[in-house]
Image (cartoon, grey):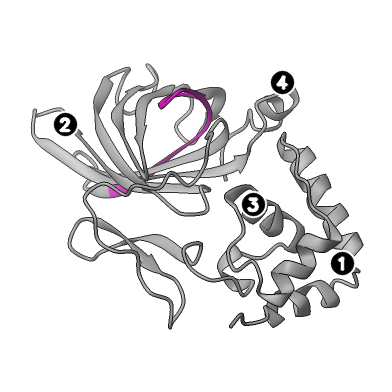
């Protein structure tokens, strides 16, 4: 027996949109993101009646764009109602973000790939401890992600980092819901680290919506001690056009 999605229906009605209007808005959101959606009144009816309990990742992103709300607040069932969270013991787990939703079965390598392509404009954010300054810091970059098969090439945009003139690059491999690879950051010659080049490894879990990856980095410090910390990538736009790149060629806030 299906359970109607009264939450989605209430959200749509609060936006003063008919089912036809809502479908049109989803198609337009897909176009803005660089892909085509075949959204129709019939699809909205099937969502609201509960006949379709889980939208595909692309429709999930369009729903978030149109409503301005996270997909896990729109009344859909697992697996989209999940988030990668800090486990409190130095690691990350995939957990449900709402009560009453079953957590995914534990597996060392999640089998499902949330998206078919991760190309787009992402915000990279990592945390690190500076022994010289005895404090925690955050490094942020707007990066372009390009996918070729199961490989992701990540490159920061010029002038788009919280530490000016510190380009970042990552070379990653997607295996189901896990991303593994290496990172390199060349610090600014006139900055605190005086042009030092840092590099290391990284592994992240992909959230079911395909809009966020979160995990840990590892690398050597200036005294050749091993350091680690959290790192995440958040999707900003699926587009990689020159217009999009120009839009994000700025210091992240």
Q: Which mark is residue 242?
A: 4
Report, in whole angstroms, how far the alpha carbon at label 4 lies from the one at label 2. Answer: 36 Å
Image quadrant in which the N terminus is located: bottom right
**Residue 148 magenta-drawn?**
yes
Q: Which mark is residue 221?
A: 2
In the rendered view, would you say 148 is above or below 235?
A: above
Which badge, 4 or 3, is on the more N-terminal residue?
3
CB under 8 Å between discs 2 and 1: no
Q: Nearer the viewer, mark 2 or mark 1?
A: 1
Which badge, 4 or 2, is on the more N-terminal residue?
2
Report, in whole angstroms, how far the alpha carbon at label 2 lies from the one at label 1. Answer: 56 Å
| Front position in the image: 17 or 1 | 1
Which badge, 2 or 3, is on the more N-terminal residue?
3
Q: Which residue is mark 3?
A: 61
In the rendered view, would you say 97 is above or below 60?
A: below
Q: Which residue is mark 1?
A: 19
Q: Position of residue 101 (x, y in %)?
A: 43, 76
**Residue 23 magenta-drawn?**
no
């Amino acid at each position: 027996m299906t359970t109607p999605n009264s939450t989605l229906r209430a959200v749509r009605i609060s936006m003063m949109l008919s089912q036809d209007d809502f479908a049109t808005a989803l198609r337009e959101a897909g176009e803005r993101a660089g892909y085509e959606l075949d959204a129709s009144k019939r699809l909205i009816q099937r969502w609201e009646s509960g006949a379709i309990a889980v939208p595909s990742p692309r429709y999930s992103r369009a729903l978030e764009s149109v409503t301005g709300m996270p997909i896990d607040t729109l009344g859909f069932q697992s697996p989209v109602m999940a988030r990668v969270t800090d486990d409190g013991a130095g690691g990350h787990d995939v957990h449900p973000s709402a009560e009453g939703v079953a957590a995914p079965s534990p597996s060392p390598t999640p089998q499902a790939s949330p998206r078919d392509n991760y190309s787009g404009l992402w915000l990279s954010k990592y945390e690190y401890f500076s022994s010289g300054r005895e404090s925690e810091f955050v490094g942020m970059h707007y990066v372009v992600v390009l996918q070729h098969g199961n490989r992701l090439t990540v490159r920061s945009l010029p002038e788009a980092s919280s530490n000016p003139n510190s380009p970042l690059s990552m070379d990653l491999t997607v295996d189901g819901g896990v991303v593994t690879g290496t990172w390199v950051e060349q610090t600014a010659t006139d900055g605190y680290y005086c042009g030092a080049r840092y590099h290391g490894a990284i592994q992240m879990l992909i959230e079911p919506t395909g809009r966020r990856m979160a995990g840990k980095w590892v690398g050597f410090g200036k005294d050749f001690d091993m350091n680690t910390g959290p790192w995440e990538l958040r999707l900003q736009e699926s587009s990689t056009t020159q217009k999009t790149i120009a839009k994000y060629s700025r210091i992240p806030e």
